[in-house]
Image (cartoon, rainbow, N blue to C red):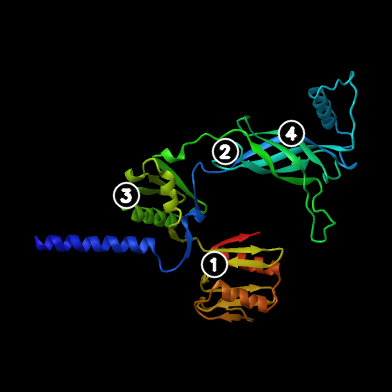
Amino acid sequence: MNIGLKQFASRIVIIVFALLTLAFPREGLTARLKDIASVKGVRDNILIGYGIVVGLKGTGDSSSEVTNQSLSRLFGKLGLDIQGNAQIKSKNAAAVIITAKLPAFARVGNLIDVTVSSIGDSASLEGGTLLVTPLRAGDQAVYAVAQGQVSIGSVADGTTKNFPTVGRVVSGATIEKDVETNFAAKKNFRLSLHSSDFTTAARVAALINGELSGKFATARDSGTIDVVVPFNYTGTSVDLIATLENINVNVDTRAKVVLNERTGTITMGSNIPISAVALAHGDLAIEIKGAPKGTRPERVFEFKGGSSVSDLVKALNALGVQPKDLTAIFQSLKQEGALQADLEIM
């Protein structure tokens, strides 16, 4: 009986140690769960609408049929009778597309910013006023109504305008319809990692289970964690999310080197190793010590064993190697299998 208890206790210690090792690795970036994952279904919705900006100082559309028809219809709705097929032309008006983001859980009466973009040949929207414009979502329902003064902004000198045909109306749209949801009553939900990684997903599930003292979270794949709402959080899923999103997670990522060929900028993780290799490129020869005998070029730039990508980059920069040469060198290292990381060239 005592031997059985000892074996059982031993197994428990091993399991606990494994969980602690998984959840708390020695190295890695620590981030809050809310910064690396999102709750499925909790997102912004895109709104779009078509409208007219008026009050421009001769910088509106010159001969846009769309603008003319829109003005005719507008005047008709306002009670102004347009005789026959008379064309309405005005350099003080411009046809625009309005876009906005409807935040998750936004309610009727909330205000949101909108972006106004010219679709005709208007030279500038400066000083214009956006007329009342309904904004629709993908289901074609109207969720907000926009109107207001268009601001196009300027650069530091206060005179030159960045993009005079695109502007914003701050707090320019009023939400007119709620997005129906009852998040507090949810019995389960799904977390989606912003960057998929099996190790990180497993750590998140282990940490959530540790926080809730039970088996409530399951990592379904490298980017998905399903969570069942515990009995004591029934009807208060918001409180549960508030608790979980502040859990600190050691984020694991694949080793990666990103090289911007235009600027020569290299971004990488720390201590990415390079295997033994000998490489010749133009007048430059590189050898990572440990390469097989007989592959050593006549003119060699040597590195000690255990060299990393950081060591190589520093040496190449000191030699004044051009961005195009950096790209060729790293591509060759990757093809040879000496670069122990993913390579992305921008």
Q: Quadrant of residue 178?
A: top right
| Front: mark 2 or 3 | 2
Crowd class of label 1 (few under 14; some 14 to 19; many from 20; radius 10 Å): some
Crowd class of label 3 (few under 14; some 14 to 19; many from 20; radius 10 Å): some
The residue to which callout 3 is attached is: 215
Q: Earlier in the sequence, mark 1 or mark 2?
A: 2
SS state under label 1:
loop
Q: Earlier in the sequence, mark 2 or mark 4?
A: 2
Q: Quadrant of the C terminus?
A: bottom right
Vertical comparison of 288 with 144: above or below: below
Residue name at image x 32 percent, y 62 percent: 18
Three-letter amino acid code at the position of disc 3: Lys
**Furthest-front residue in this view:** 109
The residue to which callout 2 is attached is: 107
- In the drawing, what numbered circle is on residue 198? none
The residue to which callout 1 is attached is: 269
The residue to which callout 4 is attached is: 132
- Measure the alpha-carbon separation of dots 2 and 4: 20 Å
Residue name at image x 42 percent, y 48 percent: 239
Residue name at image x 75 percent, y 40 percent: 148
Q: Quadrant of the N terminus?
A: bottom left
Q: Is residue 28 left or right of residue 135?
A: left
| Front: mark 4 or 1 | 4
Crowd class of label 4 (few under 14; some 14 to 19; many from 20; radius 10 Å): some
